[in-house]
Image: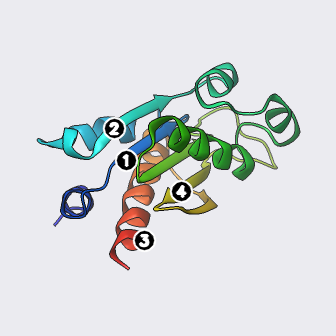
Amino acid sequence: MSNLVQLTNILVEKSLTIAVAESCTGGALSSLLTSQSGSSAFFDRGFITYSNQAKMDMLGISKGVLAQFGAVSEQVAHQMVMGAIERAKTDVSVSITGIAGPNGGSAEKPVGMVCFGFCILGKNFTTTQKFTGDRSQVVDASVDFVLTTLINELSS
């Protein structure tokens, strides 16, 4: 069973709703989740906040946090996930912000560095992963990481 089908089944069986806040994935997670028939039972909304201004406008991200830590940081991922859950009032929220490449990386924040925020039934956490490959591979790996993490968290 694919990760997508497995996650969909869990969300439907548990009557849970989800909202996502995406930056570097540009809506790929939202698109994948809504590709399933019946997704309106669990998918509430997706915020595609590619620019810093969009993050501030749509999710209430602090300009100070963006200035201090940068858009690709666990601090911003945390504010993104909390902004999404506060606005959507869902059971689950996820945020993704990173550097998909091929440009934009630095020694401190290399291409493939992606920060995630999760709010799952009131449990909040962030994590940073480093993926390899081209832009589409980083996006795909990021989406797959979210699906796997949600399956693991919601199955325990």
- State if disc 4 and disc 3 touch (CB < 8 Å): yes
Q: Residue at x 13, y 42 (%)?
A: 38
Q: Quadrant of residue 41?
A: top left
| Relative vertical location of residue 131 with respect to residue 35 in this rendering, above or below | below
Label 3 is placed on what type of residue?
A: Glu
- State if disc 2 and disc 1 touch (CB < 8 Å): yes
Image location of residue 85, percent across then percent down: 51, 44
Image location of residue 97, percent across then percent down: 60, 42
Q: Which residue is drawn at 25% across and 55% down?
A: 4
Residue 90 lies left or right of residue 49; in this view the side is left
Label 3 sits on residue:
153
Callout 2: helix, strand or loop?
strand
Q: Residues within 10 Å of mark 2 (few under 14, many from 20)?
A: some
**Viewer-closest of 90 and 49:** 90
| Relative vertical location of residue 74 with respect to residue 61 in this rendering, above or below | below
Label 2 sits on residue:
44
- The mark that comes first in sequence, 3 or 1, is 1
Callout 3: helix, strand or loop?
helix
- State if disc 1 and disc 3 touch (CB < 8 Å): no
Q: Which residue is drawn at 67% across and 43% down?
A: 79
Label 4 sits on residue:
118
Give the Cα distance between marks 4 and 2: 16 Å
Q: Residues within 10 Å of mark 1 (few under 14, many from 20)?
A: many
Label 1 sits on residue:
18
